[in-house]
Image (cartoon, rainbow, N blue to C red):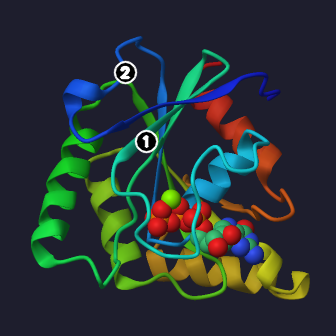
Amino acid sequence: MKVNQAEFVISAVGPAQYPEDGLPEIALAGRSNVGKSSLINKMIARKNLARTSSQPGKTQTLNFYKINEELYFVDLPGYGYAKVSMSQRQEWGKFIESYLLKRDRLRMVIMLVDVRHPPTRDDAAMYDWLKHYDIPICIVATKADKVPRSRWQKHVKQVKETLLVRANDKVVLFSSETGLGKDELWGLIANLAEL
Ligand code: GTP
Ligand code: MG
């Protein structure tokens, strides 16, 4: 897909701020620092529209990015960041949960995992939760540029086995550095969002 236009719309702290123009939404979930914001930037070929940081826990709100007046990417706060307090974590849970469960124009969750390491317990919990509620999922195994090509398949297999990925869920190998997986992911998104 050719991205002609991409704009940051809002950092929402609650449903009242969600956009109301009815466009389909694709949400990005994953641990802090896994590369959610970087993936958005790569997908829309912009350096820093979605704010990235080497400091985990940067994104704390639901950040909506409108693409071509056709869809939104919704950058969710990362989970599994130890320095976030328990009460903050519970708040996080409720806020994200209600978005994921109630938002009727949500078409798919892109769940990112770091392809270098086996998925964590938090990753498995997130995936199981999404499965349980029948939310369409695409798994993106990112930071592929950090693994030698000869080991890619082995690492992807490890992701699939650790998460018990269902046969119908796609696992896309991705790199926000090189753009690997970008076209494949756009293909999946375009299909689901009926673009
Ligand atoms: P939070 O907003 O804290 O939840 O993090 P995030 O998931 O949005 O991560 P972000 O995109 O900010 O990236 C975190 C760090 O990982 C940054 O230093 C990025 O440059 C780096 N990074 C992200 N994706 C890739 C990738 O595909 N390859 C490499 N080598 N580095 C990446
Ligand atoms: Mg981020």
Q: Amino acid at mark 1?
A: Asn
Task: Return the x and y of residue 68 as percentages of the image width and height.
Answer: 67, 19
Image position, residue 88 (x, y; %): 16, 67
Q: Which residue is mark 2?
A: 19
Establish if 189 lies above or below 139: above
Check the image and report above or below for 114 versus 77: below
Residue found at x 56% / y 24%: 71
Closer-to-camera residue (192/57): 57
Task: Provide residue 70's location: percent of width, then percent of height.
Answer: 60, 17
* Amino acid at the residue labelled 2: Pro
The percent coordinates of residue 83 (x first, y second) are: 29, 83
Q: Is residue 19 left or right of residue 116?
A: left
Q: Residues within 10 Å of mark 2 (few under 14, many from 20)?
A: some
Residue 170 in sight in this render: no
Q: Is residue 90 among what the camera can see?
A: yes
Residue indicated by mark 1:
63
Considering only vertical position in the picture, is 49 above or below 116? Answer: above
Q: Residue at x 73, y 44 (%)?
A: 43
Q: Is residue 67 left or right of residue 101?
A: right
Q: Nearer the viewer, residue 148 or 14?
A: 14
Q: Kindly indicate the quadrant of the structure image that contains residue 59.
A: bottom left
Quadrant into which the C terminus falls: top right
